Image (cartoon, grey):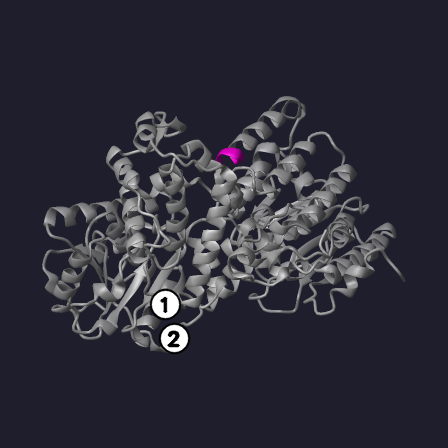
Amino acid sequence: MTTRFDDLKAMSGDEVVTHSLVSDIPLAGGRVLALVTLDNGRDHTRPNTFGALGLLEFAETIDGLHKRAASGEIHAVAVTGKQYILAAGADLSKVGEIPSRDAARQLAQLGHHALGKLHGLGVPTFAFINGLALGGGLEVALHADYRTIDLAGAGVALPEVFLGIIPGWGGAWLLPNLIGIENALKVVIENPLKNNTMLKPKQAFDMGIADAAFGPANFLEESIRWADGVISGSTKVKRSNEPGKIERAVKWDIAIGIAEKMLKSRIGSIAKSPYAALELLKAAKNTDRETGFAAEDEKLSELIAGDQFVASIYAFNLVQKRAKKPAGAPDKTLAKPITKIGVIGAGLMAQQFALLFVRRLKVPVVITDISQEQIDKGIGYIHGEIDKLLEKGRVSSDDANRLKALVTGTTDKSQFSDADWVIEAIFEQLEAKQDVFAEIEQHVSETAVLATNTSSLSVAQIGAKLAHPERLVGFHFFNPVAVMPLIEVVRTPHTNDETLSTAMVTAGKLFKTAVITADTPGFVVNRILAKLLGEAMHAVDTGTPFEVVNHALDPFGLPMTAFELLELVGLKVGAHVLDTHHAAFPERFFESANLHRLAEHGRIFDRDGKGKIKGFDKKAVEIVAGGSSPMTAEQILRRVEDGLADEIKRMLDDGVVSAAEDIDLCLILGAGWPFQMGGATPYLDRVGASERVFGSTFHSPAIRGVDEQRG
């Protein structure tokens, strides 16, 4: 039989189908609960996901249960998932292959068609959230009349905005009408933009997403017993967060207005999905279900067919797949075991290193510096951070005591004799780093790995005074160390495979993503940022007002402007990075005397007492005055786009990394480049910079998001 979804079926031949398996559960009084278990037949490493075939099977299954309910054969329907997983939403590999806006609209409509059958079934419907519930997985639960949740589950989320789309199978309408607009804004917009944060099961219960919560030991049995009480009328369900008349009349629009201002200040206006979601949440105040779902259909189809979703899927695949199989990584079996860590330095970065190493590796960590006073201050900071983890319930009292006991400090370098890994975190001065490694080599074993956290100096030159430079590797963290997921692992011409393998394996144990780079100025992230920031300072130096330059690069969609970034990294650090790159590549990177003067002054922006920007500092404006060749915002944007395309092509030609994908992975994880932009190279292809500069592109049209069939 022909249906309106036949085109989607034709594109789904190799779909890993999530099946809907039905079993009858006897209840009290002769009643029967039909339990639908979602299961794709794979182990827990492949979560349940929905493509067209899975959705159609779900719809057919619920239609069959509808008939059984009408005949009195069953008295309720519940949906749960295979062990630990309800569902992880749509099959993104299939969504990414949608060829047109019409097909995207069909997918949105199919989601509403299938999941919506849980509503108005004639008998009560339940969702037993037994584990991970993301996107469409959570929307399955939202379509049911009632929900329970496993308190030990992996968590729930609507991450669509993070991926450049919106919750399009009911979530944008159902959720605010269940838990209120402020809670819905947190789940739909705030959490996805906060590193894709998930709700813990208890949080989901407290918000009202779930009506009951049970422990893992007997979760299914308890959920069935609770559902039986609801069916019989002995269990009453109260929902304190459901929006009432006052919230709809007053609070709703106020909350939307506050959220819109927050978005504009935090991410600008380039990313489309957060604003599309905001529009849907706003409309959910006074529209009916059918109207709300139709609006979701249109927004989802528009976004799926757009460039930003294509870029998001590209970025998602980088983070989920390429990051797990780093290019150029030696065999993991070559890695040396790490049983003790040495940290050279006791400043802020060194303190963060020591804390991260002791938390993740749980091995002794010893720090050293030139004075015991500095060392004691560093250990005090680390102990204080462990105490904060204890207060937040993230470690137990016993664990906190053990972690503290593992961190010691000394001015006696001989205490490093049994360390397997020693990392330095002193100031960026080549000779100082050379000397500190030459000294420490006299104390460590011949098998110890030496690592430097330099951000721009040559790792090979840092090891120039070592007797065994093959044991040295760059291990460049990003600040704040605990939060930023990237480590640039720098291989010098001397670094051997054992050292490199140890670095890669260690990065993984720290829960970081490691990308191998050649030993070249700035490696990846700082070289790209030096190009961007250098062009911004050059524009100001030649007479362009701060205001024009500051927003000229908004189309990149970066989380902050060029001058905000300069202040964040530190003006002196920024000046040093620009100087380093100018010295290495004088024909392509500018030096800026004005940036050094701004660094001495200490700021670019005028801020209020809470740090909010009020405008540009008057003295800063005076410092940069005098240029006679101002540029327009359009000219600046074109210069930066072409400059980045040229620099990235040179980096690839020189083998700094294996592929353009590695550069984008570094920028996404190390510089906050938005998922919706897909990193730098797809953007540069889309705007034509790649063609202008080197007559070709970094990627195929499908990745660039300019396929003419889309639309």
Q: Is residue 347 above or below residue 464?
A: above
Residue 375 screen position, x and y as percent: 15, 50
Q: Position of residue 382 (x, y in %)?
A: 25, 48
Asked whether the residues under the numbered discs 2 and 1 touch, taking CB atoms below 8 Å apart as contact, a structural biologist would say yes
Residue 52 shows in the view:
yes
Quadrant location of the N terminus in the rendered image: bottom right
Q: Which residue is located at x 54 percent, y 45 percent? A: 192
- Residue 285 versus residue 711: which sits nearer the camera? 711
Helix, strand or loop at disc 2? loop
Magenta segment: 263-267
Instruction: Inspect the image, locate mark 1, and give the three-letter code of the amino acid beneath it.
Output: Met
* Closer to the camera in the image, 46 or 685: 685
Q: Is residue 265 shown in magenta?
A: yes
408 part of magenta stretch: no
Q: How far is mark 2 from mark 1, CA to CA?
A: 8 Å
| Residue at x 82% of width, y 45% of height | 122
Q: Is residue 510 visible?
A: no
Please, which residue is most extreme toward the front here?
628
Q: Is residue 326 above or below residue 85?
A: below
Please tell me which of labels 2 and 1 falls first in the chain.
2
Give the vertical position of 573 relative to 263 (above or below): below
The answer to which image quadrant residue 705 occupies is bottom right
Image-based side of 146 in relation to 662, left or right: right
Residue found at x 31% / y 45%: 574
On screen, residue 78 versus residue 363, left or right, reads right
Query: Residue at point 63% right, 40% down?
Result: 277
* Main SS, magenta residues: helix
What amino acid does circle 2 point to? Pro
Dot 1 corresponds to which residue? 504
Report which residue position mark 2 lands on. Answer: 330
Query: In this view, which residue lies farthest toward the right?
Result: 1
x and y, in percent, of residue 324 in the image:
47, 66
